[in-house]
Amino acid sequence: MLLNYKRTTVLAAGSDYLRAIIGIALVVALLVPFKSHLNSTTASLLLLLAVQFVARQYGSLPALVASLAGVLFFNYFFLPPIYTLTIADPENWIALGAFLITAMTVGELSARARRRADEAEARKAEIERLYLELQEAFKKASYAEALKQSEKLKSALLDAVTHDIRTPLTAIKASVTTLLDEEGSARLDAGDKREMLEVIDEESDRLTHFVNGMIDMARIEAGEMRLRRLWEPIDEIICSALERAENLTRHHHLKVEIDKELPVIKVDPRAIGEVIYTLLDNAAKYSPAGTEIRLTARRGVEDQVLIAVSDQGPGLPVEFRERVFDKFYRIEDTGRRQPSGTGLGLSIAKGLIEAHAGRIRLEDGDAGRGLRVVFTLPVGDDEIPQENEEGKNNT
């Protein structure tokens, strides 16, 4: 049996290498008829995309084979003299070397990203399994057994938290190291350097958001969430959240509808802004690019303000609409995509809304398509201070 397993593994690995070479060959076959209209730079970029695809599908070693095959094909078909492996111009040596280094780097980074994603999914599956075991332990087993399962859950959660911290740190470290390396930095043009700086900026924001979310969740569960309530116009809170989420919603059509006569409400602006940002983030994650995300704010019943965010994604069955507010809960087999995340966003949003004596719920989206998340907030429990009101009128 062990021999059969090893033979199967070897055959599978060989098949991956063969697919990698065939993939590069297919790309070259598609490019050759148009080579008179393509320059060598365009051809090399398309081959690099093929290498990246191979890395994402089959791993780093097949990507290395694809890189070597790409170098040979690139030299044979696109670098003069064509249809030979001769390299006449010394500059072509530089071009081939740069292509090979870039292809290998892209392949390794893509394969690493795939491994990280697989590890994250495995950890999340383990968290859910242990969480269910913990619930069963409290029902059927002794306190000692439940305590043991609780410790396992803590360990699994620690692993997940460590991963979600390490992933952005890895990206930041890789970008910074490349920029600081004089030889590597010299090969980068201004666009590449800016892209690395944007990676550093985005991953830093991601790390900050994750840490803040964990802190907020801990405070909510401990009953220590201290709200700094101020009288604020709800449209200013919404505009601030929209500006913060601009990068998340740039591939969607964002429609915002805010009633003109909304009252000033007494809330913690940072907390409510975080809720709106989370809902926009979820809508962008779970709906296809190019579809509409709609944010509305209007006067509700009984002196309340009602805010809703709807998308045009696959929606969510009714039986899951309460469970999505549970910590670390991830939905499977519903047709919804599974983007990265810890499953804390809606839990935190619910905690923040309920801390304001509000309510949050999920509904069908507009015309029965997609999903709408609605929350209500009371206007406030006392009058607006006179100086606060005068200050806002003078602004």
Image (spheres, helix red, strand yellow):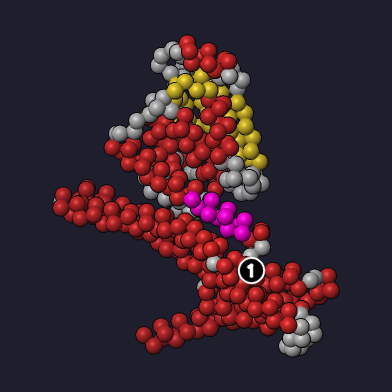
Q: Is residue 263 left or right of residue 320?
A: right
Kindly state the secondary structure of the residue where label 1 is placed: loop
Q: Residue furthest front?
A: 182
Q: Residue at x 73, y 79 (%)?
A: 91
Q: Which image quadrant: the N terminus?
A: bottom left
| Residue 320 image offset from top left, x and y in percent | 43, 43
For label 1, the residue is: 187
Q: Is residue 258 above or below residue 294?
A: above
> Mark 1 is on which residue type?
Arg
Q: Which residues are magenta?
A: 193-204
Name which quarter of the figure residue 192 lies in: bottom right
Camera-side residue of 255 and 66: 66
Dominant secondary-structure state across the stretch colored magenta: helix
* Residue 252 seen in this snapshot: yes
| Residue 257 image offset from top left, x and y in percent | 62, 28
| Residue 180 image offset from top left, x and y in percent | 53, 63
Is residue 201 covered in magenta? yes
Camera-side residue of 308 and 315: 308
Q: Residue furthest top?
A: 386
Camera-side residue of 197 and 334: 197
Q: Is residue 299 above or below residue 93?
A: above
Is residue 28 covered in magenta? no
Q: Residues within 10 Å of mark 1 (few under 14, many from 20)?
A: few
Q: Is residue 272 left or right of residue 51?
A: left
Q: Residue at x 53, y 83 (%)?
A: 14
Q: Residue furthest right?
A: 36
Q: Residue at x 61, y 39 (%)?
A: 293
